[in-house]
Amino acid sequence: MKHRAPAPRNTPAQPTGSVRIVGGRWRGTKLPVLDRPGLRPTSDRVRETLFNWLMPKLPGARVLDLFAGTGALGLEALSRGADHAVLVEHDRDIADHLRASATRLQAQDIAEIVQADALAWLHAQPEGAFDIAFVDPPFDANLWGGVMPVLVRCLRPDAWLYVEQPLAGAVDLPAGWRLHREGRTRETRHALYRRDAATDADTLAPEPVPAGT
């Protein structure tokens, strides 16, 4: 009697590279990068500049990393003093790696990993839940228009919003938000926004990213 060969197991996705946390208590820690369409980690230089801008707002902040990918933005915020971060990622394998990274950093109590569709998850969140949000979706998915109106409802009146987008694209934020800082690389525009009602803009670092870097 012949025996049927066992069905092949699904093997977990393996990292093809890494990015590092550039500042704070976990400085130098490497985070895995999986080979996924649209997964485009924010560069070390851009993150360094962004978190210099945000440094006065990070201590004690509640942070949302909406399209988490490598988790570099949300985990960097925790490394630099944020109180809690929610990292939302749709891809199951990437979410598993995010949980592994949080465990390795002993950050399970402050880093909440959510495997879910970002827009569906946002609809279930309370108003004013976050101080800072990072939005860096896959560029070819055209998700900004649907996400932004729901996202800003979840942000506090004095919240800050970081958006990364292709140079040729345009992101329209709902009324009540204005540009605070921006920079560009050869492929992306990255911008930090604040609500008009906020009064502490001058407490953030003033230097922008040099154009063309």
Image (cartoon, grey):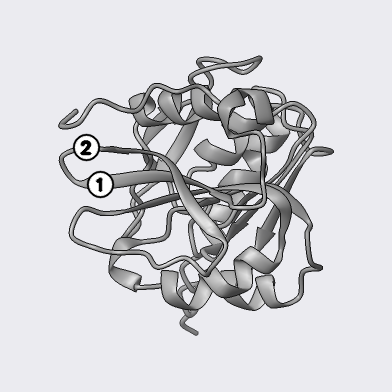
Residue contact between numbered discs 2 and 1, judged by CB atoms under 8 Å: yes
Residue visible at 62% across and 18% down in the picture:
26
Residue visible at 22% across and 37% down in the picture:
185
Mark 2 belongs to which amino acid? Thr
Residue visible at 67% across and 30% down in the picture:
57
Q: Position of residue 69 (x, y in %)?
A: 48, 50
Q: Which residue is mark 2?
A: 185
Q: Label 2: state its secondary structure.
A: loop
Residue 188 numbered tag: 1
Does residue 90 appear left or right of residue 15 in this picture? right
Please count the marks in the image.
2
Q: Is residue 169 above or below residue 102?
A: below
Figure quadrant of residue 128? bottom right
Does residue 169 appear left or right of residue 132 in this picture? left
Q: Where's the C terminus, which quadrant? A: top left
Q: Is residue 119 above or below residue 106?
A: below
Mark 2 vs mark 1, CA separation in Å: 5 Å
For the residue pair 10 and 20, the one nearer the viewer reads as: 20
Q: Position of residue 153 (x, y in %)?
A: 69, 68
Residue 157 numbered tag: none
Mark 1 belongs to which amino acid? Thr
Q: Label 1: state its secondary structure.
A: strand
Q: Position of residue 108 (x, y in %)?
A: 79, 38
